[in-house]
Amino acid sequence: MRLILMGPPGAGKGTQAKFVAEHYSVPAISTGDIFRANVSQGTPLGLEAQRYMDAGDYVPDEVTNSMVANRIAEDDAKGGFLLDGYPRTLAQVEELDAMVGERQERIDAVVVLTVEMDEIVQRLLQRAQTEGRADDTEDVIRRRQEIYAEQTEPLIEVYRERGLLVEVDGMGEVADVTARVLEALDSSPRG
Ligand code: AMP
C-alpha cells in the first residue's frame, strides 16, 4: 500500500499517520519529523531547514525531494509507505511521480483530512503548550495555514482528477477518525 496523507497543519495527520501505517504494516514517513530530527541533531540538512521551518515556510523542493527519495529507497519502504506531509507543492507531486514511476509503482490513494478552521487553531494552540514546537506560535500558525492554502490545497484537485482522492472528516475522537480513514480506503475503488 502506498498512501499519501494530506490536510492542513493541525488536521491530525501525524497522529493518524501512525495508526493507518500500522494497519497496513508500512512505515509512516513524515517529512516534518525527519526535518525536526535533523534540526535537533544539528546536521547540515537541519541547519538548512530550520530557518524555513521557524518562519512557517516550506523548505525548498530540491532539499525535500532528495530527502524523500533517499528515505523511500530504504528497505522498510520497498513494500509500501505512508507519506505524511509530502508532497506539499506541485513540483513535489511531479518529483514523487518520477520516484514511484522509476520503481514501476504507483500511489494507491491520497487521504485528505478535513477539519474546521476553529478546531485547527484550538488544536495547534494546545499542541504549542504540550509539545512546545517552535513553529506553533500564533503568527507562524497563521503563516503555515496561508502557505498550505496557497501551495498545497491545489494538490487536492490534482489527485481528485486522477481518481485517487479519499476525503475523510477529521473532526472528533482520534480512534473514530482512524476508523473512518480505514473504512474509506477499504471502500474506495482502487485499480
Ligand atoms: P509538519 O510537521 O508536517 O507540519 O512540517 C513542519 C515543517 O517542516 C513545515 O512547516 C515545513 O517548514 C517543513 N516541511 C515538512 N514537509 C515539507 C514538505 N513536503 N515541503 C517543504 N517543507 C516541508
Image (cartoon, rainbow, N blue to C red):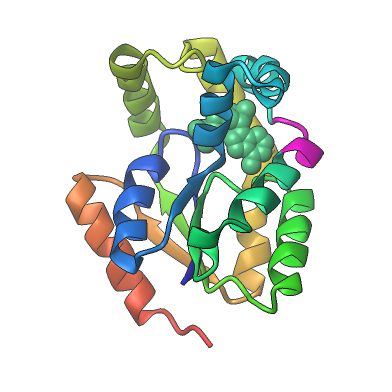
Which residue is painted at 47% across and 11% down in the image? Answer: 137
Question: Please, which residue is most extreme toward the front here?
Answer: 75
Residue at 38%, 13% in the rendered image: 132
Would you identify the image quadrant in which residue 47 lies?
top right
Residue 174 position, x and y percent, is: 22, 46
Q: Residue at x 54, y 35 (%)?
A: 34
Does residue 145 appear in this view?
no
- Residue 88 sits in quarter: top right
The percent coordinates of residue 185 (x first, y second) are 37, 72
Would you place residue 8 above or below residue 2 in this image? Answer: above
- Ligand 1 falls in quadrant: top right
Q: Nearer the viewer, residue 9 or 15?
A: 15
Across and down, in percent, residue 33 comes to 49, 34
**Residue 43 appears left or right of 188:** right
Relative side of 166 to 72, left or right: left
Q: Is residue 20 magenta?
A: no
Which residue does the image show at 34% across and 18% down from the upper left? 131
Please provide percent x and percent y for residue 189: 46, 84
Residue 143 appears anywhere in the view: yes
Q: Is residue 63 placed above or below 92 in the rendered structure?
A: above
Nearest the viewer among 66 and 11 is 66
Magenta stretch: give its range.
59-63
Is 190 rendered above or below residue 108? below
Dominant secondary-structure state across the stretch colored magenta: helix
Give the tally of numbered discs. 0
